[in-house]
Amino acid sequence: MRARQLLTGVLLLLPLPAGGQSERDQALLTRIDAAIGIEPIPDMARPEDGVARQIQQGLLELERHLRQSDRRALERALFRFNQASLRRPEWAWPEYAMARAFLLLHDLEAPVIASAGSRLGEPHVAAMWRHLLEATRRDPDLLRARILLAELAYAAGDREPPPDVREALAVEVTRRDARPEAMVAWARHQRALGATPVALAILDRAAQLGADPSVLALERARTLAALDRIDDARASYWQGLDPLTRDGHALYRQDVAWLVDADSIAAFDAVARAEVGAWLRRFWAERDAAATRDEGARLGAHLNRWVSVLQEFRIPSPWRRTLHSRVDYAFDYIGDACVGSVTPFYEQLPVRMPWLPGDVRADEPIIDHRGVIFLRHGAPLTKAVPPLVIAEGVGEGTGGEGIVSPRELSRLLESLEHTEVWVYWIEGGYRVFAFRGSDALGKHAATTLGSYLPWHAAQAWLALARVLPESTGAAIQINRPKTSPATCYAAVRQAVAQQRTDAQVGITSDSDTPPVLDPWRAVHRFFAVGHGADGSGRAVVTFALQVGDLAADTLTRDLLAWPIEYRLVAYRPSDGRRITIDTVRGPTGRPAQPDQFLSGYFEVPLEPGAWQLSLRASQQRDSLPRAYALRRHLVVDDGPALALTDIVTGRSGQPGWTAPDGLFPINTLGTWPEGGTVELWYELRGIPPGEEYHTTIQVLPAEQRLRRDISVRVTDRSPGGIIRVRRTLGLENLDSGRYTLVVTVEHGDSTVRREQDILVTSDR
């Protein structure tokens, strides 16, 4: 190190030749640089200038490092480039070459040590940017520096560019020969600022300059969505997939990765590039069908959400937030006794979000957690944004169980400066997401999803209770004077447990549920019956709606009608087949008590295969659905093999379903009293006449607290053809709770099995 310092001192005493670098020398260096890591370095003449020869030797050291993984060669290259920059402070090549070297160190994830051209403690990527931008200032025409700037800015995706990078890009995009990747990066920046017409014009210019057509198609789709041109946006999205380029594949993959878990993105990765378009059509079509949306609606919503998220939830100055790999699990506050932390949840909260190949800024977050939830689930039904009020008793004392010390109180006040509660309807119930500021994503807003709403924010709980009355008990307990932590009270513990479940759902799924406001007390059940051999396959869908939730039309003094608007969507994922039924059901009857139920059923013809069936219901006065249900795996069998339909469950006295062999009392509520009986109906096929088969019927607990079960095994002889079975199963000795009814049929080496949920209640 001492010798290197002395050498530097000697070199600084040498006279620095004046004038710019010769075109011949620059051409020689360009040929070497373009070949590094791609092809063998060509034999060529030595540059005329001694400093240019020093740069040439440094580039050859870079090549040696790539071939031999020689870190010392990389350090020698940096030394040569740094000396060249000192000797020729007007030349851009030494600065560009140092940027290349520091980029290699960053890619290696090499530890930061004192290297020529770096500042004390400076990360490799920061040194790379500093030298690259200096190269563009020294010579705005240096093509190799312009290419690297454009590639890095493009790979950063929609991250906010730092001021000096914006400055360099602003110069690049004004050139007649601007790099197309730089134009795409600049269009993204303008779109995030809300200048969407400008962004669209820049993308058009990028197309003229030869930008990747698949990339342009997706970027245009997002920009057109921002201009509320949804049909054009969807068309542009699909245009980018035919054909799909390598860079386009990476961008579409990143787009999907915002929504799905590791298993789903692995399924995307397993698809050949030529088949990605078909995969994505099924991906979006399945989500449309699951939410009973029109075809293309979910994709249009996704494109709109992306634009909104980048404008509303993008993290300012993200380059300042690169030291966090996760949100600190200690986010569950000190003093929150009786609930404990949920470390696994905080470890999987996204901080390092989906990135593009070559993104040197991958450690920087792009959007905060509100944006992640918004992308996956859309806008909340409602928000509760309370004033900052700390619960009574917090901050008293000097620490200890249940008491927050003054120092901790200071941290608490800072973290609660921004608190938001978002409420959704997901998977059949309300979901509550509580956000607050954090070091990882910033304290400028409610950036970070917590596992529950902190009990110290008393007014936040009251605001939540105004939105969800079921939170009232917990809110009252939290706002009541107390000597022990609020989280030790049963109502609060229950609310915390539910919010933790909600938070887990929020980050591990994207919503297939349409927004449901003020939901009806409704039960919907699904059964697949029939067979593909004779075209009898169909879904039987039952409904039970509580009268008190419905508006009635008066037909006569003693006769009412309750018109219900239903949409049912059946979807077959294997080939994208979709069946949509819009219908109005108008049950009629005498005036009923509010707690009574109106019941009925639909039949939806289904071809063979595994189907997903969703429905939503409302009345004419409703602006949003009032009921929603989804069944993901309804199977209609085909072929001669042993086959079993779903088990249709009934209860004496219930409405009659017209089964192929006569009326069956199908149970629309899905509940049975303790000690009652379950009526069963199902069909069997594929057993030759006279041959034996065995049936096992089980009722298994679906809750850990339940200890008893039922198991019955019988042997029958087949009459041949379609075997329609009716059985009665007693529920004696079963406690109230949730159970799974399982029917298993064995014939020879073949076994078939179907399941159905049942609920045993203490009501008679």
Image (spheres, rainbow, N blue to C red):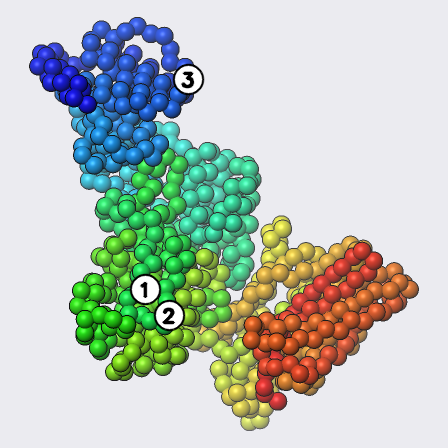
Q: Who comes first in sequence, dot 1 or dot 3? A: 3
Front residue of this view, candidates 573 and 4:
4
Find numbered disc 3 in the image and state the secondary structure of the residue it sits on: loop
Q: Is residue 136 left or right of residue 100?
A: left
Looking at the picture, how far across and down is residue 253, in whole percent?
Answer: 45, 43
**Mark 1 belongs to which amino acid?**
Asp
Quadrant of the drawing holding the C terminus:
bottom right
The residue at which mark 3 appears reads as 39
Quadrant of the drawing holding the N terminus:
top left
Question: How far apart are the alpha carbons under marks 2 and 3?
Answer: 60 Å
Question: How far apart are the alpha carbons under marks 1 and 2?
Answer: 9 Å
Q: Is residue 391 left or right of residue 549?
A: left
Which mark, residue 339? Answer: 2
Do residues under tags 1 and 3 come within 8 Å of each other at their CB atoms?
A: no
Q: Residue drawn at (49%, 77%), measured in percent from left and top?
A: 520
Front residue of this view, candidates 32 and 438:
438
**Mark 3 belongs to which amino acid?**
Glu
Looking at the picture, how far across and down is residue 534, in whole percent?
Answer: 78, 60
